Amino acid sequence: MKPLSVALWLWLLPGLTEAAPARRPPLRVDSEIEYYLPTKTGRAIHTGFVNSVFGVDLLRGHLIIEAGVTMTVASGYINEDPTQHATVVGAGPIIMFRCEPFRIGPFSLLFDVVGALVVYSDNFPPGGDLYNFTWRLGGAFAVRLTERLTLTTGARWMHVSNGQGLTPKNPSYEGVGFPLGLLYRF
């Protein structure tokens, strides 16, 4: 066996050999709020998200795929020009890949990759377009409150761009954020 496949089996083995609960439901619903602070002074945009996703546990919780809807409010300006300040609301589809490699009792560590397409109420950021893609990457700490309810909190990095390349019609921005979520397992 190659070293990579041995490492993969050693990583998956604890989850595969755990005693299965009498009834392990596959569906989960995750509601989350996020707030992002700008990382660059010339791109001073504050962003908030509310995510509602549902998904399935794969590999006994070690890999989770969820999809749903994200709603956002963003406010700020780019290029240090407060006269170009804008505030918008938006919504769109979201997909999240979550890895839960470490679990000790009711506590676990999560790693998230989140992607969404957001359509805004106006062109945003100023000079941009009505839509943007948002990419979020980070981690979270989870505490299982009951057998079905889990509280999560963490930190994520975010990039927002409309994908039109390095042009004036694509005023991208980045932020660092803090998600807080509740997960319910059916």
Image: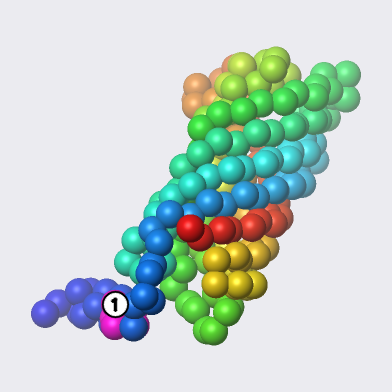
Q: Is residue 15 above or below residue 160?
A: below
Number of residues whose C-alpha sits closer than 10 Å to that of mark 1, classed few (under 14), some (14–19) or many (20 or more):
few
Residue 155 can be seen, yes or no = no
Q: Residue at x 44, y 73 (%)?
A: 101
Q: Quadrant of the N terminus?
A: bottom left
Residue 120 can be seen, yes or no = yes
- The main secondary structure of the magenta stretch is helix
Q: Residue 142's image quarter?
A: bottom right
Q: Nearer the viewer, residue 35 or 23?
A: 23
Q: Residue at x 80, y 30 (%)?
A: 75
Q: Is residue 15 left or right of residue 139?
A: left
Q: Which residues are magenta?
A: 13-18
Reading the image, the residue beneath label 1 is 16
Q: Amino acid at mark 1?
A: Leu
Q: Residue at x 34, y 83 (%)?
A: 19
Q: Is residue 149 above or below residue 43?
A: below
Q: Nearer the viewer, residue 106 or 148?
A: 148
Q: Is residue 138 left or right of residue 64?
A: right
Q: Is residue 77 magenta?
A: no
Residue 145 placement (x, y as % from top left): 64, 72
Q: Nearer the viewer, residue 28 or 85?
A: 28
